[in-house]
Amino acid sequence: MHIGSRPSPEPGLECPMSCLERHKSVLRRRGPPTHLRAPLCGLGLIALLTALPWGGVSAQASDDPPVSLELAQLVFDSVWSQVANAHYDPDMGGVDWEGARDDLRPRSDESFTRSELRLRVQTLLGRIGESHYTVIPGESWDRAAAVASDGADSEEGRTFGDPLGVQVRLYGHDILIAGVTPASVAQEAGVRPGWRVIRLGDREVAARMDEFAEEEIDARTALLLQSGLQDQFMNPRADHPLELVLEDGSGTLHTFELTPSDAGNVPRQGFGTILPPLPFEFSHRRLPVEGGCVGVISWSVWLVPVSARFQEAMGELEDCRGIIVDLRGNLGGIVGTMSQVGGRFLTEVGVLGTLTTRDSDLRIQAEPVRVTMAGDAVTPFPGPLAIVVDGLSMSASELFASGMQALERGKVFGSPTPGMALPARTVPLPGGDYLMFAFADWTDSAGRRIEGVGVTPDVQVPVDRDALLEGRDPPMEAALTWILGK
């Protein structure tokens, strides 16, 4: 899909109702909110489905078969009723849901192909006006799962290669290289931060961005532009070298052919049938500073391995003066992992946020971590915690940042987050697709609703091209300065 070329579904966040069923003893009717120490399975984010190779209405199979009227109506009615029964607000946020059904339900004088039906259903979901409603093509999900389990696409004989090591972000009306991972394909090829993206494959990125030159780019469009391109670097096909044309600070063009490794150095992990496999990258490092070090920890998605890896990293960094958790570009994931991460910095139980369904409240808590998953005794980290976020820090990343900010245990740096923080679930639809839809709202312990608003950093540090070209990272610099001043 060419960036911004057609209507796109919203990103989604999902959670199986089974994980709430296992805790339903702690759910009450309205009244004082209930407490949950550490959910066995929490919320999960699937990133922007328009961008991922397995998702989105725009992802079509090579053939686009017709759909019978009976199936079209069955799918539509199933989507409509699931949302009507599960929306956290009995009044549907003021949306005329019955009117939407009357307007959009397939009629006998209409015919649909599979992709056209998906677009019709997505139009229905768009009436909600929130970010966690989408249709996931069944064949796309199944293909992603097959790739992760077998390492190959059984139908097309292709594999996903390892991520190319490039982060892109919007700067004014340009898409810039915001970061390059050390020892990655991109760094070895000579890609540098601050360079402007002119073309990516067959996408004329700069020319497309020029179309926005006379207008302000709204938040949703900015998100789609960045995430759609970012995915090309995160989920490359191993047998498809990616041609990239960049412009450096002097206006000179550079052409690269980035060939992803298929060595499997970056594992792909999901969460059963709840999350499709996503590249899981985790890193930590020590920054030498006067009087010791500052630890930096970063990961790409909140999945089950985060808990153990984070505790291992903290074991190596516990002598540092402070910790920077870099969540830029982190797409979210399993909310239960937030409790283990947050608990490493707390000396008493803290409420990260409250999940509110139509008739129940559920508090997500973090308890002080005193024993690691390996059985080793630890004490909560006493030093300052800085959390760095940006416009692609989503879902669990937003919830964690806002939760620690509200508890006054972490200070947030960087750019505002996109505000995609509704817990949701995924169910199969007739015909083989999946429906993702919200069933709860979320507020942090300060009573702030994150959906549609996002997290406002305590210290806002926007993307700065001059700094990038100089090899600097202003948000990290601001976080480091704050820690050293404590």
Image (spheres, rainbow, N blue to C red):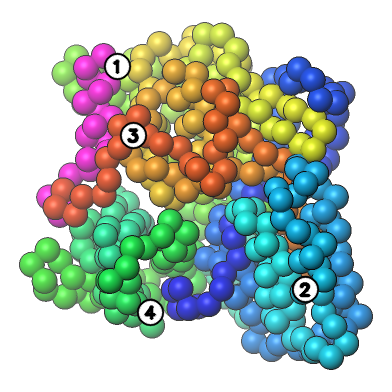
The mark lying in front, picked from 3 and 1, is 3
Which of the two discs, 2 and 4, sits closer to the camera? 2
Relative to 348, say whether 191 is above or below: below
* Of residues 35 and 295, the one drawn nearer to the viewer in this rendering: 35
- Residue picked out by circle 3: 413
The residue carrying mark 2 is 103
Spatial distance from mark 3 to mark 1, Cα to Cα?
Answer: 18 Å
Above or below 187: residue 406: above
- Classify 10 Å Cα crowding around label 3: few (below 14), some (14-19), many (20 and above): many
Marks 1,4: beta carbons within 8 A: no
Q: CA distance from mark 1 to mark 2?
A: 60 Å
Q: Residue at x 48, y 12 (%)?
A: 380
Name which residue lies at 66% across and 82% down. 61
Q: In the structure shown, which secondary structural element does the residue marked by tag 2 occupy? A: helix
Residue 271 appears anywhere in the view: no
Q: Quadrant of the rendered structure where residue 481 is?
A: top left
Label 1: how many Cα within 10 Å (few below 14, some 14–19, many 20+): many
Residue 228's x, y, as percent? Answer: 46, 66
Q: Secondary structure at mark 4?
A: loop
Residue at mark 4: 203
Provide the residue span drawn in magenta.
468-486
Query: Dot 3 lies on which element?
Result: strand
* Residue at the disc numbered 1: 321
Looking at the image, is mark 3 or mark 1 earlier in the sequence? Answer: 1
| Mark 3 and mark 2: Cα distance apart in space | 45 Å
- Residue visible at 71% across and 50% down in the picture: 94
